[in-house]
Image: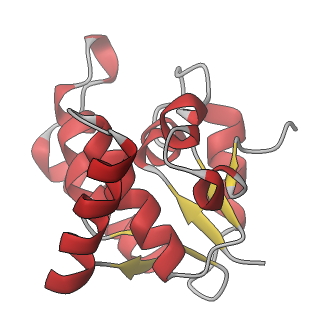
Amino acid sequence: MKWFFDSSVLVPAFLPAHVHHARSFAVFAAATPQNASCAAHSLAEVYSSLTKYPGKERLGAEYAALLVQQIEEKLTLVWLDGEEYCAAIRRMAGLGIVGGAVYDGLVAACALKARADDLYTWNVRHFDLLGAEIKKLVTMPPAL
């Protein structure tokens, strides 16, 4: 089984007060580089989210960078080359995907490249718009 992580699961894995922390942390804790991956650009999304998170759980730059390093060590990073990037954008244009949903499309393209069996996300609706090939992969972290 190959898992793929969206940043919407990675961020709450590190924020104990987050409503999705327990389930996100549990699936992240079970991940290994052999069975799990994420998009390389998700590292920037996680870092950005942790350092701008509202309230008391906002993290400083150094601590957020350490948590991103844990993701690097726990998951295999997947990225798109130039041709794959352009193909992903053409695919999204064909589906009418615009705005911020484009970033979910790039995550989905990386999940396909990784041959993921499950794409863990809390943004199921966003990914369901990306076509049947993606929709069949999309799942929320399992209940405890």
Looking at the rendering, in which quadrant would you find the N terminus?
Answer: bottom right
Nearest the camera: 78 or 18? 78
Judge whether 40 appears above or below 99 on screen: below
In the rendered structure, the answer to whether residue 6 lies left or right of residue 98 reads: right
Residue sitting at x 65%, y 49%: 135
Residue sitting at x 18%, y 35%: 51
Whether residue 66 can be seen here: no
Nearest the camera: 36 or 70? 36
Residue 141 image offset from top left, x and y in percent: 72, 44
Residue 31 image offset from top left, x and y in percent: 65, 70
Whether residue 14 can be seen here: yes
* Extreme-right residue of the structure: 144
Residue 136 image offset from top left, x and y in percent: 73, 55
Residue sitting at x 69%, y 35%: 22
In the rendered structure, the answer to whether residue 37 lies left or right of residue 98 reads: right
Q: How many marks?
A: 0
| Picture quadrant where residue 41 is located | bottom left
Nearest the camera: 92 or 31? 92
| Picture quadrant where residue 116 is located | bottom right
Which of the colour schemes (rainbow, by chain, secondary structure, one colour) is used? secondary structure
* Extreme-front residue of the structure: 94
In the rendered structure, the answer to whether residue 109 lies left or right of residue 22 reads: left
Judge whether 64 appears above or below 89 on screen: above
Residue sitting at x 46%, y 42%: 14
Residue 86 image offset from top left, x and y in percent: 18, 72
Nearest the camera: 53 or 105? 105
Judge whether 62 appears above or below 3 on screen: above
